[in-house]
Image (tube, rainbow, N blue to C red):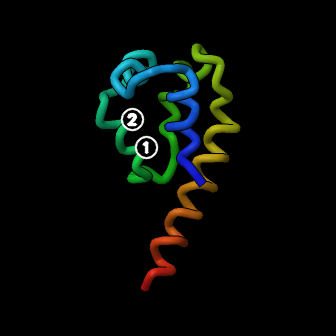
Amino acid sequence: MLNPVRQARKAKGLTIKEFAVVLGVPYSAVSAVETGLLTRIPTTWEGGMNRLDMDYQAMQKAYIEWRTQRADEIAGGF
């Protein structure tokens, strides 16, 4: 399973920097979400995601599922 935020960003044809500008957040915040360092998508992203016709609530749910699955994959290796 791929990171749903990364997939949505790429589907819009945006670079991480462009996505960050629309969201009004630093590049590092987008990178942190795309690599799974954050447990949730920050609520401050909702307005920018709506501007891009992305459903923030659906994306949040998909991201949490993706991150949980990723954590389980990593933990399964021990």
Indicate left or right for 45 with 56 as reference. left
Please tell me the numbered disc located at residue 30: 2
Image mark for residue 33: 1
Whole-percent x and y of residue 42?
48, 38
Quadrant assignment for the C terminus: bottom left
Residue at position x 53%, y 57% in the image: 67
Q: Residue at x 51, y 28 (%)?
A: 9
Snapshot quadrant of residue 16: top left
Label of residue 13 in the image: none
Of the residues shown, which amino acid type is indicated by label 1?
Val
Work out whether 43 lies above or below 2. Answer: above
Q: Position of residue 5 (x, y in %)?
A: 53, 38
Q: Is residue 32 left or right of residue 57?
A: left
Quadrant holding the N terminus:
bottom right
Position of residue 32 relative to residue 51, above or below, is: below
Q: Marks 1 and 2: in contact by CB < 8 Å?
A: yes
**Relative to 24, is 5 above or below?**
below
Real-space CA distance between mark 2 and mark 1, rounded to the nearest whole angstrom: 5 Å
- Up the image or down, 74 lies above or below 6; here it is below
Q: Which residue is more in the foreground, 38 or 69?
A: 69
Q: What residue sits 66% from the left and 46% below the top?
A: 61
Residue lying at 65% horizontally and 47% vertically, measured from the top left: 62
Crowding near pointer 2: few (<14 within 10 Å), some, many (20+)? many
Residue most extreme to the bottom: 78
